Every structure is written in structure tokens, then in C-alpha cells.
Image (tube, rainbow, N blue to C red):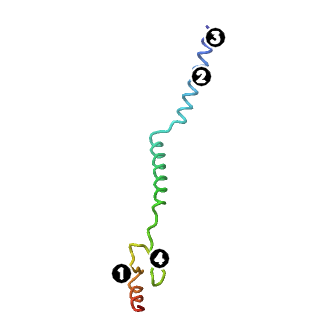
Amino acid sequence: MSRILFFLGIFAVIAICWTLSRKKQELSIKERDELEELRRNERGRKNAAAVIGEPMEKCEECGLYIPKRDVVRRGSHTYCSARCRDAAAKRE
């Protein structure tokens, strides 16, 4: 009988230690949400780094590179401003 009680006691101690160690390692709901938010932000930063930037074009008069959306066009020529466009027109 004493052997059975001894082994039951050892089993109980092991079960209690295992349960306590699991509780220490378990994340709360708030911690899980924070961890998931950090992971989403990290993925977002990686995707944003790939998207940063836009197409550029070179001004035919002064050689300045400007965003394609800000280009001043005259026919098939591209310029950075009306001043460069007019200067090129005077030279022609």
C-alpha cells in the first residue's frame, strides 16, 4: 500500500510541476493579440518597402529626374518644368 501511495505522490508532484510550467509558457489573449499585431506590422513594412518609389523620367533640357506624374510634356518630349520646356522650344 505504501508503494502505491509513494508512486501516486510522485505522479501528483510531476503533474503539478508540468501544469505550472505550462501556465508560465502560455500567452494571455492580450499577449497573443500584441504578437499577431507585431507580425502584421512586420509584413506590412516588408510590402511597403517593395512598393516605395515611383517611375521617374529625365528632363530632356536639364537632365533632372522627376516623378512621372509631375512631368511637363511637349509632344513626345518630357521636361521638369515649363521653364525647361520653353527653353527647349527657343533652341529649336
Q: From the image, state whether disc 2 or disc 4 is nearer to you.
A: 4
Specify the amino acid type for callout 1: Gly
Residue contact at pointers 2 and 4, CB within 8 angstroms: no
Specify the amino acid type for callout 3: Arg
Mark sitting earlier along the chain (1/2): 2
As measured in the structure, the alpha-carbon distance from the residue carrying label 2 to the one carrying label 4 is: 73 Å
Label 1 neighbour load within 10 Å: few <14, some 14-19, many 20+: few
As measured in the structure, the alpha-carbon distance from the residue carrying label 4 to the one carrying label 1 is: 18 Å
In the rendered view, does 47 fall on the left or right side of 20?
A: left
Q: Mark 1 points at which residue?
A: 75
As measured in the structure, the alpha-carbon distance from the residue carrying label 2 to the one carrying label 3 is: 15 Å
In the picture as drawn, the residue positioned furthest to the top comes out as: 1
In the rendered view, would you say 52 is above or below 70? above
Residue contact at pointers 2 and 3, CB within 8 angstroms: no
Q: Residue at x 41, y 81 (%)?
A: 79
As measured in the structure, the alpha-carbon distance from the residue carrying label 1 to the one carrying label 3 is: 99 Å
- Identify which residue, 26 or 71, lies in the foreground: 71
Specify the amino acid type for callout 4: Tyr
Residue 74: % across, % down: 36, 82
Label 4 neighbour load within 10 Å: few <14, some 14-19, many 20+: some
Q: Name the residue under label 2.
A: 13
Q: Which residue is drawn at 47% across and 42% down?
A: 32
Give the number of the disc on residue 3.
3
Specify the amino acid type for callout 2: Val
Q: Mark 4 points at which residue?
A: 65
Give the number of the disc on residue 25.
none
Quadrant for the N terminus, please. top right
**Under tag 4, what secondary structure?**
strand
Mark sitting earlier along the chain (4/1): 4
In the rendered view, would you say 25 is above or below 73? above
- Identify which residue, 15 or 2, lies in the foreground: 15
